Image: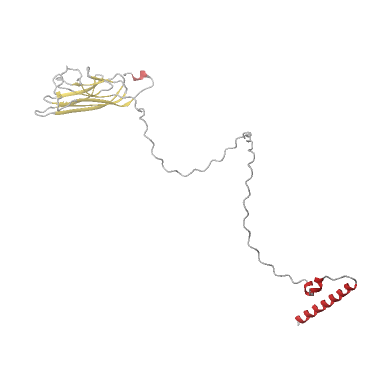
Amino acid sequence: MAPVVKTTWIAVLCVGMAVKLGVSLEEGTEPTEQDSKEPCARWMRGVAGTPGFDGIPGRDGRDGREGETGDRAAPASEGPKGEPGEPGDEGSTGKRGFPGNPGLKGENGESSFPYHSAFSMGLTGEVSTASGAPIRFTKTYYNEQHHYDEISGKFRCTVPGIYYFTYHLTIHGKETKVAMFQNGKTVAFTLDQFHSGNVDQASGGAILNLAAGDEVWLQLYGEDAFDAGIYADNNNDSTFTGFLLTPKILSNPFDNRRR
């Protein structure tokens, strides 16, 4: 039914156009040869077609030429120095780091104990001394400060303080009494009762508080002091030793005098 109606409308339009064309001819207007030959269907606008698909993107264009280098700008002048800002808040304590490698060993420093006084002396043979005289030890093991006088047989205190003295004596043939003296007073003594056929060892010691100028020595003690059995040889020693334990240095040098 629809095609019939459409055909009818087309026929009507053609008739109308023919009539209009006839009128134009009567008025003296000549139609062109092309118009007289084309059908009426070409004079009508058709229905719009479906849009086509998008074309393929074109290729990238060529790179442009490099522009000319511009002029170098003049260096800017330094601005005025600003005022110091306020100190910031103290940050939190960081994590403890790993221990570092040990450093190089430093040079030896000065001793914290600058005062030294020590000696160790021995006998070279039998004791031969007058009654009431110190035993003279003439074999030196150590006497760097020379505080022991091997001529007098006495130790003379130069550095006041606490000292330790000890002696070890070889006894043979006689009963022997030996005493340690400080400034002429007995502070310790040893008695060795010799038994025939034996070699004995008599030992003793004492800790003394000495002032500068005090003297300490060993001496035979008793009525037979001149006839003793103390001796030393290649296989036996008799020694007298003393050394400073603690110095006592006062601010006033007169306080170190012997009382």
Residue at screen point 82% across, 77% down:
14
Furthest residue toward front: 33
Percent across and percent down for residue 29 are: 88, 70
Q: Residue at x 16, y 28 (%)?
A: 201
Q: Is residue 19 above or below residue 157?
A: below
Chosen colour scheme: secondary structure
175 to the left or right of 65: left
**Residue 182 horizontal/vertical position (percent):** 25, 21
Query: Which residue is nearer to you in this view: 7 or 51?
Result: 7
**Res 231 quadrant in image:** top left
Residue 227, position as x, y percentages in the image = 13, 20
In percent of the image, x 78 and y 80: which residue is there? 7
Residue farthest toward the right in the current orientation of the protein: 27
Is 22 on the left-hand or right-hand side of 134? Answer: right
Left or right: 186, with 75 as reference point:
left
Foreground pick, 81 / 129: 81
Left or right: residue 61 versus residue 20 is left
| Quadrant for the C terminus in the image | top left
Rendered location of residue 132, percent (x, y): 19, 17
Extreme residue in the bottom direction: 1
Q: Examine the rendered structure and indicate whether residue 19 appears above or below residue 150.
A: below
Quarter of image, res 225 = top left
Give the quarter of the figure containing the N terminus: bottom right
Q: Residue at x 81, y 73 (%)?
A: 36
Residue 105 image-quadrant placement: top left
Q: Tell which of 178 and 113 is nearer to you.
A: 113
